[in-house]
Image (cartoon, coloured by chain):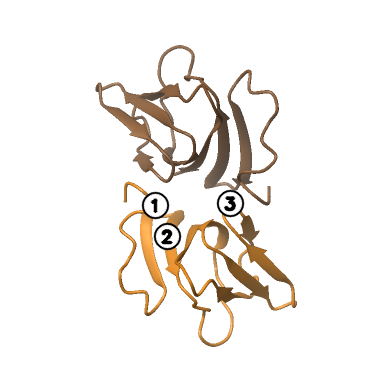
Chain colours: A orange, B brown
Amino acid sequence: MNNIFASLPEDLGAEVFEDIVRSDTVRIERIVSRGHSSPVDGWYDQDENEWVMVLQGSGRLLFETGREVNLGAGDCINIPAHTRHKVDWTDPDRPTIWLAVFYR
Amino acid sequence: MNNIFASLPEDLGAEVFEDIVRSDTVRIERIVSRGHSSPVDGWYDQDENEWVMVLQGSGRLLFETGREVNLGAGDCINIPAHTRHKVDWTDPDRPTIWLAVFYR
């Protein structure tokens, strides 16, 4: 991928997750959503830490604690491993592009 | 840092490097340049791999092989460890914001 805003998936019937970099210790992912929330049931409960930024569009994270975080372009947050959370809402009117770095 | 475009350094007399995330295996950095090239002498020759993206502004990388790569907003490139390179040029008229992920 040479430009993070290019080659967006045409079919956004589901969220699209694409690896940009994958090594033993780090994974950099582009996630494109449009009106999705995820996971469908329950919470993400990840073995890795995740640093995530919205590059375009907007979304809202919900944590099991009840904390809500709205994210627009440039907003970023660090989610320690096993911090239960979900993507509660993303803009239904245009693609939201996330950059996520998963690391140990 | 809650927004990657916010709290830009006022003094851009030199490039400004800020850690966003630092763990044993990964370092996520914001770099803000304005008309700088770097390093001043010679080449970057890094022990870590670097994935880097321009978020705002524009810059040009030069590799020891002679390859030049112009980067604008959203453009990204993976630079394997010990690939000698430099930042040859950045826009003198406005800050260029880079996101760099260094990893093993």
Q: Position of residue A39 (x, y in %)?
A: 51, 80
The numbered disc on residue A74 is 3
Query: Picture quarter containing residue B10?
Result: top right
Which is in the foreground here, disc 2 or disc 1? 1
Residue ID for mark 2: A30
x 55%, y 44%: residue: B28
Residue ID for mark 1: A4
Badge 1 and badge 3 both on one subunit: yes
Neighbour tally class for label 1: few under 14, some 14-19, many 20 plus, Cα within 10 Å: many
Q: Amino acid under label 1?
A: Ile
Neighbour tally class for label 2: few under 14, some 14-19, many 20 plus, Cα within 10 Å: many
Q: Earlier in the sequence, mark 3 or mark 2?
A: 2
Query: Picture quarter containing residue B64?
Result: top left
| Distance of label 3 from label 2 (alpha carbons) | 14 Å
Mark 2–mark 1 CB contact (< 8 Å): yes
Which is in the foreground here, disc 3 or disc 2? 3
Q: Position of residue A74 (x, y in %)?
A: 58, 51
Q: Position of residue B100 (x, y in %)?
A: 49, 40
| Distance of label 2 from label 1 (alpha carbons) | 8 Å
Circle 2 SS class: strand
Circle 3 SS class: loop
